[in-house]
Image: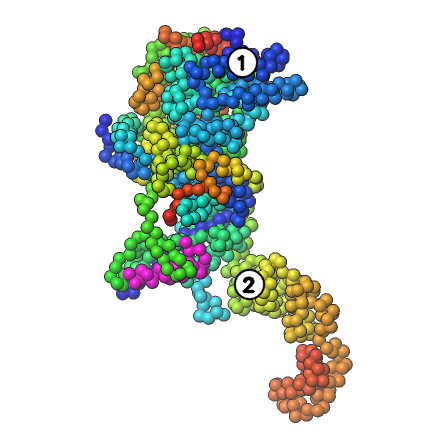
């Protein structure tokens, strides 16, 4: 029997705000233990929550970017459960009235080859709601230590429908979702910092079956690659169990990405009964058209739309767009440089950015923002090459100098005397005339229509110029002289 | 007063995380049954089409702007803690 | 009225301070001395800090000497129910759970009183976590009724009412979830005001039932209630349920707002279970209003009988969640012999909470548990809407409503061992909380046994100025409060 996998993802994304979800003490990562607390975070007796407007703006933006319906009215509920990372022993969340409903995430599946665009697909979302993060437990040999710095950080829960079919789709879903959040300035989505966390619900069923199989929840998938590997592993595990005649038990499993194994979390907790009820300490939220429109106006173009535009407007190949569009800063950098370089030079600009700039930044371990090479420099470089002033080989050398010094390519060319020679067209013309005179056979062949015969004239010219002659000028001059000779 | 069949005091005490002695369980069960019987009266009220009151005077969109303020010092934050080490709260080992 | 400083109202003491006839230090010393004399018997305080109080009083005197007095409350010792946070002072909720807790922050009302120059004086006893009607549920000790030490002072703000009646403070703050200010005020012969929900910030008030709790003043006169209310009201950005509304001059309103008023008498509050002496005293007060030319009309609040049921669902549901934070982890009582984290929760909470608190947490957990939400909590919220609508309908016809505050005068300690019987003490006060309305209890007589009786006036939302003016019309013409207890 043939089986298919059905996967639903629950993704938690921390919203990048200055203060916490329900109190104004600073939010942040990497601070000394328990330095980001106040009476509200610690749930001291008598404290009350107050909503963070920026967190609401951010989740509405996320919803708009993902095509969700924004609820006109939503409210806050308490989810009651005891755990030492929770200070109130209830989490303020949204139960039956989430702020965002429906919507979808566009994904691209792997293409036939790296340089070929893959199939696009839309993964439906169930909902997105807003809640607060919990503190962090540090497990020691004999006890655990609690740090509440993270407690109260605004957190979105993005729930997909169970429509993801494979580990690759899950990987593509997270990649796209993550880029969308970063594009929107909603979160940095650094999984190492816990800013994006993913749980997967996985089941298998015979192809053709419409009922869902028993689902297993996979937790602690702490990188996008581990999500892919963990899901692939779990699907294989379920297939193996089923094919051996066993049955899948509903359980939560922990995936160890390094070891590539999973194990059941046999927590002895009873069935959850969260006793949700509306939080009497908070007032409901009403989102009107003006609020939504204001946020809509701040919504950026998303990667796939940008990719299509880059392909159409700049004639960029997929190999370049597939790199450029996933990083908003890089895409913006490209567009600025391409515009400065002028028409017809976008692909050259793209190549310099994707290949050379990325390599230099990678070697120096620098962010794009810290790059000494600015978009204007790239544009100037491409123009110099196009004008024949700079040869490709020399340009590579200039580029390394640009990365090191931040000087403009023209300044470096001038300083180091790297301009293509000769710029004196009379000298060049002289070499060309000599070459034509000395190579009658090639001239005859060329005139007879053999286009490649012109190359036979170029060798002697390059030799005469000691390799510094501008090939473009050489080509132009030769053709001009041959036409009249 | 008899205890309603569905009043599973062990389950409720477990959710509430309160250890009850057998005597407390018996006593509370009986007392809660009394109170619940009184509450049963509410079933006589016709609430068709009545909106629930969550807040006496509901208003919408009560929030604060996202401006970070300073919080408690670590000393103040942990002053009332029953057990602390390395500026953190000590709890019995949590097995996830 | 006794000539003793500690028995005088704020209005009089403010004039004496202003005239420099007395100093705040003298007044505070008088209150301290009185407390040290009588509190052994009354047991209104959980703790007090005389050095701190005298330092505040000295600072007040210094301000006044420099011509920088902060107004009527500057230098007046005000006692605080031990559920309201004061920086550096204990905050126990009269619970073993918080026996050693010291607050690192001020409640908004505390900050406001400090801004008004008041001398923050002592931590007043209550029923543990404000759950009770007699102050017998305090984990520390039972407060006595100053008029009869064998009787309860009412609750949950029993310490606030008893301390004021006994001259151990010039005014006090309490909190009221189902009658916890008005009921003890009635039982102890003082004025007790529960403001409209949202008028006074709850930030820094230990939550019992968040949608019902309000902080309010206990005072000797209605005029004092106006003075103290003025100091504590106002929108607070730290309390999302705090209401933005224009704040009038309450004390001035006592003079500017003149009747005659239309006053409603709800028949549901004068039926079975009402003590005849209480009924007679309230009737005399109604007759007095009639003599002022007020129109007395019967009104109906038909859903009154469901009030206790609705209250015990909503209040316990909210408290079961509000009290989850008391787990022995970050602060509070932690059991010494827990085996693991779950055991630590079970034992710390079993050891830290008293029986009434446990009972209510269990009930609240039950009504919220899976499968019961619609039948209990949601239905209770709907009936709450009907109860609220009853009041709003009545206000189409009348300016305020008069009822007894309590069915009976103070009862003997230990007399109500059955929780349900105790819950029914609040039958006349609960509706006001469910509807979010302001209510005030004003002394209106004594029983043949010498126990105080109070009447309750219920006002319209955020119209405290009118409510206080109506209450003052009676209070300023009677002198029940001058009958101080023999201690």
Q: SS at mark 1? A: helix
Predominant SS along the magenta part: helix
Q: Is residue A133 left or right of residue C115?
A: left
Q: Which residue is rendered at x = 35% and y = 27% of the image?
A: C356
Asked whether residue A371 is drawn in magenta, I would say: no
Asked whether residue A223 is drawn in magenta, I would say: yes
Label 1 belongs to which residue? C30
Q: Where is residue C102 in the image (x, y as percent from the top left)?
A: 49, 30
Note whether C283 is above or below A463 in the view shown.
Answer: above
Q: Where is residue A135 in the image (x, y as percent from the top left)?
A: 46, 44
Q: Do the residues labelled 2 and 1 touch (CB within 8 Å)?
A: no
Query: Which chain contains the residue that carries disc 1?
Result: C
Label 2 belongs to which residue? A324
Q: What stretch is highlighted in magenta?
A: A220-241
Q: Can residue A236 be seen in this view?
A: yes
Question: Separation of disc 2 and disc 1 at Cα?
Answer: 80 Å
Mark 1 surroundings: few (<14), some (14-19) or many (≥20) residues within 10 A? some
Q: In which quarter of the image is residue A108?
A: bottom left
Q: Which residue is rendered at x = 53% and y = 46% of the image?
A: A32
Q: In this view, does C34 lie to the left or right of A338?
A: left
Q: Which of C145 and C428 is in front in this view?
A: C145
Query: Which chain contains the residue that carries disc 2?
Result: A
Note whether C334 is above or below C266 in the view shown.
Answer: below
């Amino acid at each position: 029997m043939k089986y298919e996998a059905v996967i639903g993802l629950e993704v938690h994304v921390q919203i990048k705000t200055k203060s916490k979800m329900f109190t104004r003490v600073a939010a942040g990562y990497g601070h000394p233990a328990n330095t980001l607390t106040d009476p509200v975070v610690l749930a001291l007796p008598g404290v009350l929550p107050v909503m963070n407007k920026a967190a609401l703006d951010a989740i509405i933006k996320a919803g708009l970017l993902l095509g969700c319906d924004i609820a006109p009215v939503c409210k806050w509920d308490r989810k009651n459960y005891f755990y030492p990372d929770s200070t109130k022993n209830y989490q303020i969340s949204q139960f039956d009235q989430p702020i965002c409903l429906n919507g979808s995430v566009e994904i691209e599946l792997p293409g036939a080859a790296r340089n070929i665009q893959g199939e696009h697909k839309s993964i439906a979302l169930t909902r997105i709601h807003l809640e607060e993060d919990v503190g962090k437990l540090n497990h020691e040999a004999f006890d655990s230590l609690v740090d509440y710095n993270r407690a109260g950080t605004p957190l979105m829960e993005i729930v997909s429908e169970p429509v993801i079919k494979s580990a690759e789709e899950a990987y593509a879903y997270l990649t796209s979702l993550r880029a969308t959040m970063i594009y929107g300035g909603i979160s940095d989505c650094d999984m190492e910092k816990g800013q994006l966390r993913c749980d997967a619900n996985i089941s298998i069923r015979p192809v053709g079956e419409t009922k869902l199989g028993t689902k297993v929840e996979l937790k602690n998938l702490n990188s996008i690659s581990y999500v892919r590997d963990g899901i692939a592993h779990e699907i294989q595990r379920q297939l193996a169990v089923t094919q051996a005649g066993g049955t899948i038990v509903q359980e939560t499993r922990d995936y160890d990405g390094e070891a590539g194994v999973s194990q059941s979390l046999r927590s002895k907790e009873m069935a959850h009964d969260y006793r949700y009820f509306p939080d009497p300490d908070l007032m409901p939220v009403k989102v009107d058209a003006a609020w939504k429109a204001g946020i809509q106006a701040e919504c950026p173009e998303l990667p796939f739309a940008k990719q299509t535009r880059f392909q159409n407007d700049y004639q960029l190949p997929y190999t370049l767009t597939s790199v450029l569009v996933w990083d908003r800063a890089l895409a913006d950098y490209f567009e600025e440089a391409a515009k400065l370089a002028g028409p017809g030079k976008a692909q050259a600009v793209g190549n310099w950015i994707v290949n050379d700039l990325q390599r230099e930044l990678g070697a120096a371990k620098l962010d794009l923002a810290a790059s000494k090479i600015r978009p204007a420099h790239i544009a100037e470089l491409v123009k110099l090459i196009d004008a024949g002033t700079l040869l490709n080989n020399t340009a590579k050398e200039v580029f390394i100098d640009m990365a090191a010094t931040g000087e403009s390519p023209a300044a470096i060319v001038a300083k180091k005397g790297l301009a293509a020679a000769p710029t004196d067209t009379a000298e060049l013309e002289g070499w060309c005339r000599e070459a034509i005179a000395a190579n009658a056979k090639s001239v005859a062949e060329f005139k007879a229509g053999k286009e490649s015969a012109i190359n036979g004239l170029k060798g002697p010219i390059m030799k005469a110029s000691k390799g510094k002659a501008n090939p473009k000028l050489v080509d132009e001059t030769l053709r001009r002289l041959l036409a009249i000779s | 007063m008899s205890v309603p069949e569905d009043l599973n005091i062990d389950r409720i005490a477990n959710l509430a995380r309160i250890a009850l002695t057998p005597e407390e369980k018996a006593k509370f069960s009986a007392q809660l049954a009394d109170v619940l019987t009184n509450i049963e009266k509410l079933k006589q009220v016709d609430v068709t089409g009545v909106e629930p009151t969550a807040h006496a005077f509901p208003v919408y969109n009560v929030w604060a702007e996202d401006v970070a303020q300073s919080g408690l010092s670590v000393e103040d934050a942990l002053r009332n803690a029953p057990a602390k080490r390395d500026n953190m709260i000590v709890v019995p080992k949590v097995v996830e | 009225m006794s000539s003793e400083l500690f028995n005088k109202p704020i209005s009089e003491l403010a004039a004496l301070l202003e005239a420099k006839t007395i100093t705040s230090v003298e007044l505070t010393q008088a209150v301290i001395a009185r407390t040290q004399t009588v509190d052994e018997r009354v047991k209104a305080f959980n703790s007090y800090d005389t050095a701190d109080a005298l330092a505040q009083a000295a600072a007040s005197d210094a301000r006044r000497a420099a011509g920088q007095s902060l107004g009527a409350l500057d230098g007046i010792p005000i006692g605080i129910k031990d559920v309201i946070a004061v920086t550096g002072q204990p905050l126990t909720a009269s619970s073993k759970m918080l026996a050693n807790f010291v607050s690192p922050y001020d409640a908004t009302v505390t900050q406001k009183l400090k801004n008004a120059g008041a001398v923050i004086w002592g931590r007043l006893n209550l029923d543990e976590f404000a759950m009770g009607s007699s102050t017998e549920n305090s984990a520390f000790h039972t407060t006595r009724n100053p008029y009869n030490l064998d009787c309860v002072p009412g609750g949950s703000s029993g310490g606030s009412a008893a301390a004021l009646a006994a001259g151990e403070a010039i005014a006090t703050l309490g909190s009221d979830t189902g009658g916890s200010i008005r009921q003890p005020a009635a039982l102890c012969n003082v004025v007790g005001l529960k403001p409209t929900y949202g008028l006074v910030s709850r930030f820094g008030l230990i939550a019992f039932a968040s949608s019902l709790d309000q902080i309010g003043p206990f005072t000797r006169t209605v005029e004092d209630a106006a003075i103290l209310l003025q100091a504590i009201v106002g929108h607070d950005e730290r309390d999302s349920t705090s209401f933005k509304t224009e704040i009038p001059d309450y004390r001035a309103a006592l003079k500017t707002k003149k009747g005659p008023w239309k006053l409603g008498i709800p028949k549901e509050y004068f039926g079975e279970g009402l003590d005849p002496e209480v009924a007679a005293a309230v009737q005399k007060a109604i007759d007095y209003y009639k003599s002022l030319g007020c129109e007395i009309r019967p009104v109906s609040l038909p859903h009154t009988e469901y009030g206790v049921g609705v209250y015990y669902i909503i209040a316990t549901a909210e408290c079961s969640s509000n009290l989850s934070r008391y787990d022995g982890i970050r602060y509070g009582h932690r059991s010494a012999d827990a085996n693991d984290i779950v055991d630590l929760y079970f034992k710390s909470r079993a050891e830290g909470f008293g029986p009434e608190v446990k009972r209510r947490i269990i009930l609240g957990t039950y009504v919220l548990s899976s499968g019961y939400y619609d039948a209990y909590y949601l239905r209770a919220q709907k009936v709450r809407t009907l109860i609220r609508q009853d009041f709003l309908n009545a206000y189409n016809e009348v300016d305020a409503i008069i009822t007894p505050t309590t069915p009976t005068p103070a009862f003997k300690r230990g007399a109500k061992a059955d929780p349900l019987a105790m819950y029914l003490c609040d039958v006349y006060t609960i509706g006001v909380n469910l509807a979010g309305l302001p209510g005030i209890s004003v002394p209106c007589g004594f029983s043949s046994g010498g126990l105080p009786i109070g009447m309750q006036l219920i006002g319209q939302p955020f119209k405290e100025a009118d409510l206080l003016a109506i209450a003052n019309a009676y209070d300023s013409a009677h002198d029940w409060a001058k009958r101080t207890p023999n201690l």
